[in-house]
Image (tube, helix red, strand yellow):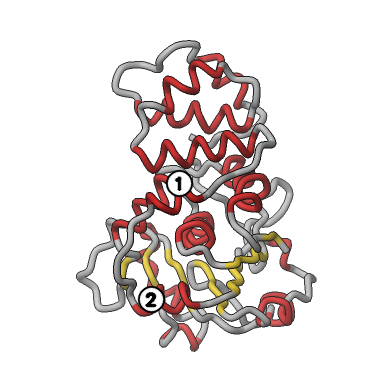
Amino acid sequence: MRISALFAPALLERWPDDPPAGAAARRAEWLRCALLAPGADPATWDRFAATLPPLARLAHDAQRHAAAGLPVDAAPLLAALPAGPLPGPLARLAAAESVAIIGNGAGLLGSGAAAAIEAHDLVLRLNFPVVTGHEADVGSRADLVIVAEAKRWQLDELRAREAAYATTPALAARVAWPRKAEATPDQVPRPLAEAVVALGYHQPTTGFFAVLLAALVLRRRVTLFGFDFFSPGRPGHYWGDTSAGAQHELAYERWMAERFLPLACPGFRIA
């Protein structure tokens, strides 16, 4: 379900004790609600957090510190992250000192952000966006594209938006991406994808997945452009109207970007 800051207190009150049997996901959801609505029972937080896998527990405890206005020590998180060889596109991302992650939000319209975007070592875009006609606001470079697994049936159509996408490195943001079709990009390695989920939640938007991967897992200096988190009253994309799926927790993603990641990731900022 899509958690909002407005409904978080009501969701907390639904579960004064343990959620229904077998509801591990509900306990994790309760913890995210508690970040959006401070004042939740500390004993309940401790009981629910204790049921999380180790990396998720460390992540939620660090987020709890941020919600309380306390310093965030990211060292335990870093020590718990998986290590191993990276595929070529991720190796380039891991080597870039500065990364611009370009969301597709309508706030980019009229921003004139192209020069600021392309001053970064690496420009990461999401789901093969439209660029032609918007270069002054979004730039034209695409050094890496992160693609949602759910869009695998649209790959040919999405890639056809820009001629440069035929040779642009792309990676799938989900661990379930099939490897049958020739047009299918490589996956983000499963251990890293699972780490992203543990650090956030199980159905992140493609943009949030990319942000956690670059800023928190790979520890790059990240600047976000065009992240509106599907704000009401705006078209979802700078090139047209759309909406986010109901499975995405947009208020939590915004909270992470605005409150947690600036404390946990040196150099992180939202343009």
Could you say whether the residue bearing mark 2 is in a helix, strand or loop? helix
Q: Is residue 216 left or right of 239 when viewed as pictured?
A: left
Q: Height in image: 238 above or below 29?
A: below
Q: Which amino acid, by three-letter code, is at mark 2?
A: Asp
Q: Nearer the viewer, residue 166 or 197?
A: 197
Residue density around tag 1, few if under 14, some if 14–19, many if 20 or more, within 10 Å? few
Percent of width and height locating residue 2: 53, 37
Mark toward the start of the polypeptide (1 vs 2): 1
Q: Which amino acid, by three-letter code, is at mark 1?
A: Pro
Q: Quadrant of residue 221?
A: bottom right
Residue 156: assigned label: 2
Is any atom of residue 230 visible in this view?
no
Position of the C terminus, as image quadrant, is bottom right
Q: Residue at x 60, y 44 (%)?
A: 72
Could you say whether the residue bearing mark 1 is in a helix, strand or loop? helix
Residue at image mark 1: 76
Percent of width and height locating residue 120: 63, 78
Tell me the mark number nearer the camera, choosing from 1 and 2. Answer: 1
Q: Residue at x 73, y 61 (%)?
A: 107
Q: Nearer the viewer, residue 54 or 129?
A: 54
Q: Nearer the viewer, residue 13 or 127?
A: 13
Is any atom of residue 178 visible in this view?
yes
Q: Residue at x 52, y 83 (%)?
A: 162
